[in-house]
Image: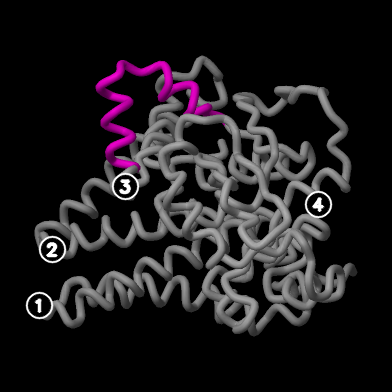
């Protein structure tokens, strides 16, 4: 008789993964409960807790996609679907998210389904100006468009695979609409704060995503779509075009706020390494002073100054050596793994 697989893929994953999932689920429930309290001294901390629980939930989806948490794919898939509901990514099939994200690793490109820049630049001028005005005000309009596109895709795509999801997406829309209506009926302010928490999650994710690669963005709708064979995309190319935008070098524990996702070079060097091993793996691979490490404090100014340029310009800018090395690093937009279907 064959020995059954353990629940967790790695023996040392029991405690960290249990804590991370408990925080994601518990923080979501507690944050939502705090939003329903009459005191704003409880509502506002509840909003921040809810936002961070969703951030952790989003990065757990990334771990489930890589199969680093549970030993059985079916368990990773089910957990990925659960956390997709909590983060608003449930309109896409988890397996589609996983497959498209794996292409990002295999093809060494930002493999996207929807080219937001082509779409926005083709819009009437007043619509484009509205989108840019929202982005100027730090409203993540591009990500909102992409999430809306994911919802619409089963109804506008000619692919049988996507059209087959129409019933499921309609059921999700109905269920979530009822739940949001109930939340608004219980407390209109709680509904507003829930939306604010979700936008905070999106903004944090897009800030992290913006500066982790200078890959080419390639719009590929179907799984068998090809990317241009215009350059050698080998492991050297991968590392030179990948950046570890760590939360902090001085206080490494702060990187847990993003589930160590910022150790991105180490993640790309060994995609099956779980999130809790990445700091040690990064140190073993690169040591101190690695050129590709860019603390987020160095990127805040660039994120602010180039927030409109990155929306309409295909150029990610350049990262150079020197004291102001990220000054012209514009960053990417619309490359979230939550919308990579």
Q: Nearer the viewer, residue 214 or 159?
A: 214
Residue 135, can we see it? yes
For the residues bearing labels 1 and 3, Cβ distance under 8 angstroms? no
Q: Nearer the viewer, residue 51 or 294?
A: 294
For the residues bearing labels 4 and 3, Cβ distance under 8 angstroms? no
Q: Earlier in the sequence, mark 4 or mark 2?
A: 2
Identify the residue position indicated by label 1 in the image.
Answer: 38
Secondary structure under the numbered disc 4 in the rendered image: helix
Could you give the CA–CA distance between mark 4 and mark 1, rounded to whole angstroms?
A: 50 Å
Provide residue 223's location: percent of width, then percent of height. 68, 28
Position of 329 compared to 291: left or right?
Answer: left
- Label drawn at residue 189: 2
Q: Quadrant of residue 75?
A: bottom right
Q: Earlier in the sequence, mark 1 or mark 2?
A: 1
* The magenta segment: 113-135
- Label drawn at residue 139: 3
Residue at (60% x, 33% y) in the render = 315
Q: Up-down: is 74 above or below 141? A: below
Residue at (55% x, 49% y) in the render = 210
Residue 79, can we see it? no
Identify the residue position indicated by label 4 in the image.
Answer: 239
């Amino acid at each position: 008789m064959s020995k059954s697989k353990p629940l967790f893929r790695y023996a040392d994953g029991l405690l960290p993964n249990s804590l991370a999932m408990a925080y994601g689920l518990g923080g979501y429930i507690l944050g939502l409960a705090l939003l329903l309290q009459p005191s704003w001294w409880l509502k506002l901390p509840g909003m921040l807790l809810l936002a961070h629980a969703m951030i952790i939930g989003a990065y757990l989806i990334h771990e489930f996609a890589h199969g680093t948490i549970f030993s059985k794919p079916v368990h990773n898939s089910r957990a990925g679907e659960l956390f997709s509901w909590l983060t608003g990514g449930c309109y896409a099939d988890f397996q589609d998210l996983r497959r498209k994200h794996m292409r990002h690793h295999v093809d060494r490109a930002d493999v996207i389904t929807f080219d937001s820049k082509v779409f926005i630049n083709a819009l009437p001028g007043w619509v484009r100006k509205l989108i840019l005005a929202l982005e100027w005000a730090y409203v993540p309009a591009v990500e909102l468009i992409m999430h809306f596109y994911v919802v619409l895709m089963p109804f506008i795509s000619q692919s049988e695979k996507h059209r087959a999801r129409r019933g499921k997406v309609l059921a999700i829309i109905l269920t979530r609409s009822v739940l949001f209506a109930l939340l608004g009926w219980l407390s209109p302010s709680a509904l507003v704060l829930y939306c604010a928490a979700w936008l905070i999650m999106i903004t944090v994710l897009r800030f992290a995503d913006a500066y982790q690669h200078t890959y080419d963005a390639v719009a590929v709708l179907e799984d068998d779509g090809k990317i241009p064979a215009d350059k050698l995309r080998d492991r050297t190319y991968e590392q030179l075009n990948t950046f570890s935008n760590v939360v902090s070098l001085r206080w490494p524990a702060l990187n847990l706020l993003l589930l160590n996702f910022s150790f991105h070079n180490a993640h790309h060097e060994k995609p099956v390494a779980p999130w809790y091993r990445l700091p040690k793996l990064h140190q073993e691979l690169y040591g101190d002073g690695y050129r590709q490490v860019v603390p987020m404090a160095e990127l805040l100014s660039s994120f602010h100054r180039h927030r409109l340029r990155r929306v309409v310009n295909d150029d990610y800018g350049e990262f150079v050596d020197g004291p102001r090395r990220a000054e012209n690093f514009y960053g990417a937009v619309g490359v979230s793994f939550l919308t990579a279907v």
